[in-house]
Image: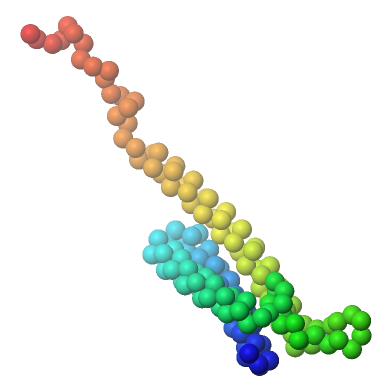
Amino acid sequence: MDTFSQFELVERRLDLMRRLADALQNGHAALVGENPIAVLTCAAQQEELCRQLVDLNAGVLSAGFASRVCLPKHFTNTTSDNATLNPRWEKLLAEIRQVEIRIRHLQRVHAALLRRMRRTIAIMAHLLQPNQLTYAAAGRPAALTRE
């Protein structure tokens, strides 16, 4: 795989990650607004973006990238003992790290919103339960039955 296509592959990964962060942000608005149709739509969009990221990551790994940040081994300047990144790759990696931080934060917020929604649903379900158990008779008294 040539240098240009490897860079495009990592740029595509970055684009998908940005779109996932935006989808998570939209999902937050749907959860806060308690709009079930919007929540389902956002969840489907997030699922599709995650699937595309998994597929792309498989391609990135098979392309011979070196580290967990998806940097090809031959994209370092080795003029001295300390290898440095090419400026183009350095900028791209910094952007990937920022998007990863944003996604982790959005996932924590999303989890908190889901927990809040579950509590709200549990409270509503409890309030709407019939009061049969509170007022149900244990059985008919024997004196009232006719035989």
Q: Is residue 25 left or right of residue 3?
A: left
Q: Which of 42/34 is in front?
A: 42
Is residue 18 something one can see in this rendering? Answer: no
Task: Determine whether, in the image, residue 92 is placed left or right of residue 40.
Answer: right
In terms of depth relative to the viewer, which is nearer, 83 or 97? 83
Colour setting: rainbow
Residue at 31%, 35% in the rendered image: 130
Q: Quadrant where the C terminus lies?
A: top left
Q: How many marks?
A: 0
Which percent across, then down, holds residue 33?
47, 61
Above or below residue 8? Residue 39 is above
For residue 145, which quarter of the picture?
Answer: top left
Q: Residue at x 20, y 15 (%)?
A: 140
- Which residue occupies the extreme top position in the image? 143
Query: With 5 as the anchor, is 97 left or right in this view?
Result: right
Q: Quadrant of residue 35?
A: bottom left
Q: Position of residue 14 (x, y in %)?
A: 62, 79
Going 53% across and 50% down the picture, which residue do you hit? 115
Residue 109 at x, y percent in the picture: 60, 59
100, above or below 117, in the image: below
In the rendering, at what x and y percent does residue 113 appear?
54, 55
Residue 93, quarter of the rendered image: bottom right
Q: Residue furthest right?
A: 80
The answer to whether 110 appears left or right of 74 in the picture is left
Q: Is residue 27 visible?
A: yes
Q: Is residue 9 above or below residue 116?
A: below
Q: Residue furthest left?
A: 147
Quadrant placement of the N terminus = bottom right
Q: Which residue appears at 28% of the width and 23% of the height?
A: 136
